[in-house]
Image (cartoon, rainbow, N blue to C red):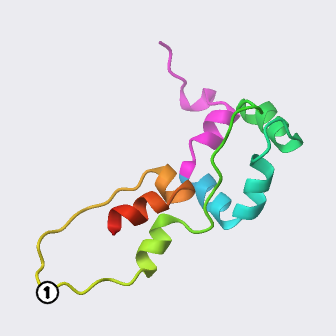
Amino acid sequence: MKFRTASKRTTTDQLLGRVDLIGKVATTLAPLANAALKTPGSMPRKAIEKVLGISAQRLLQPYARQRFSTWFKKRATPMLANHQAQVAVFPTCIVEYQNPSIGHDLVK
């Protein structure tokens, strides 16, 4: 198996490797991003296929309007009489940008 060196990275590698940047932009512009991505075979999807190589027919999840981490910081913290333990939550990109309700349920 050959690995690409930094100088041989494709445009696809460069863009898709920046998951957090894409996710932050897409959630900020969720209505526009979702409109562009929701219809397989549409012109925006064909352009994405040409540039990134992601099939225009592939079904893609819509982006959330609010990221999980944003919701988490703003939520009301419950007051517990007994502090039992600490838990660390590391949301995946799907939870952070596309389906934060999974994270909401986990926190509840």
- Relative image position of residue 35 (x, y in whole percent): 79, 55
Instruction: Name above or below for residue 108 compared with residue 102.
Output: below
Q: Position of residue 21 (x, y in %)?
A: 59, 55
Q: Is residue 88 left or right of residue 45?
A: left
From the viewer's perspective, is residue 77 above or below residue 4? below
The front one of 11 and 69 is: 69
Task: Point out the residue furthest to the right here.
Answer: 43
Name the residue rendered at 49%, 61% in the picture: 100
Q: Quadrant of residue 15?
A: top right
Q: Amino acid at mark 1?
A: Ala
**Residue 104's x, y, as percent?**
42, 66
Locate residue 37, reporting x and y percent.
75, 47
Q: Look at the image and tell me in which quarter the C terminus lies.
A: bottom left
**Picture residue at 77% right of the left edge, 33% below the top:** 56
Which residue is denoted by mark 1 in the rendering? 81
Viewer-proximal residue among 78 and 33:
78
Instruction: Name the quadrant containing residue 73.
Output: bottom left
Q: Residues within 10 Å of mark 1 (few under 14, many from 20)?
A: few
- Relative to 47, 19 lies left or right: left
Count of picture labels? 1
**Magenta stretch contains residue 21:** no
Secondary structure category for the residue under label 1: loop
What's the magenta region? 1-19
Q: Which residue is located at x 78 percent, y 60 percent?
A: 32
Answer whether residue 2 is magenta in the image: yes
